[in-house]
Image (spheres, helix red, strand yellow):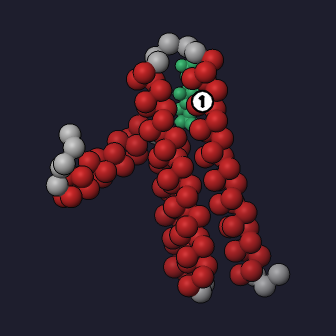
Amino acid sequence: MKGQSFYKRVGFALCGLKMAARREKSFRTHLVAAAAVLIVLYVTQPGIIWWTIIALTVGFVLVTELLNTAFETLADQLCPEEHSGIGAAKDIAAGAVLVASLIGIIVGLVFILNWIGI
Ligand SMILES: Nc1ncnc2c1ncn2[C@@H]1O[C@H](COP(=O)(O)OP(=O)(O)OP(=O)(O)O)[C@@H](O)[C@H]1O
């Protein structure tokens, strides 16, 4: 499947996003949270620096969640039976999502404190 046109490769990527949203509840939750953050930014109209920091943070969480979903899908396909190594690898990948989400919460808290002037 190498050498596909740019248009087709973008189509594959969009298809992947759709599949992740359909399969993974936590990805849907993160998408809803990202939409909420966008509304908050639109309402509060912070400076360009905050738009950039928050966009990068939200993107980081969504990308981590997508990679975790891809990894889980691959692991389940390659090794459907119980295996301690697979369990550990899945937990580590989930840990990456947790770290990204905690960073997102910290950035959100700093944004709120800055907005109310503390
Ligand atoms: N094949 C396996 N062998 C051993 N343990 C597993 C296996 N599959 C899953 N587990 C354990 O169960 C946990 C949940 O796995 P599952 O595939 O259901 O992920 P999930 O609940 O969809 O996670 P997430 O919320 O990140 O999508 C894993 O983190 C791991 O500890």
- Identity, as a three-letter code, of the amino acid under mark 1: Ala
Q: Is residue 86 left or right of residue 19?
A: right
Question: What kind of element bears circle 1?
Answer: helix
Q: What residue lies at 26% left-to-right and 48% top-to-bottom?
A: 12
User: Which of the pair 18/59 is nearer the observer?
Assistant: 59
Q: What residue lies at 68% left-to-right and 67% top-to-bottom?
A: 108
Q: Which quadrant of the picture is home to ligand 1?
A: top right
The C terminus is located in which quarter? bottom right
Report whether residue 2 is seen. yes
Q: Position of residue 42 (x, y in %)?
A: 51, 79
Pointer 1 local density, CA inside 10 Å: few below 14, some 14–19, many at least 20: some
> Which residue is tagged 1?
89
Q: Residue furthest front?
A: 3
Q: What residue lies at 18% left-to-right and 49% top-to-bottom?
A: 4
Question: Where, by quadrant of the figure, is residue 87 drawn?
Answer: top right
Q: Position of residue 25 (x, y in %)?
A: 49, 41
Q: Position of residue 8 (x, y in %)?
A: 19, 52
Above or below, comparing residue 69 to residue 90 in the picture: below
User: Which of the pair 100/111 is nearer the observer?
Assistant: 100
Above or below, comparing residue 27 to residue 50 in the picture: above
Q: What residue lies at 61% left-to-right and 79% top-to-bottom?
A: 50
Above or below, comparing residue 6 to residue 88 in the picture: below
- All told, the count of numbered labels is 1
User: Which of the pair 38/2 is nearer the observer?
Assistant: 2
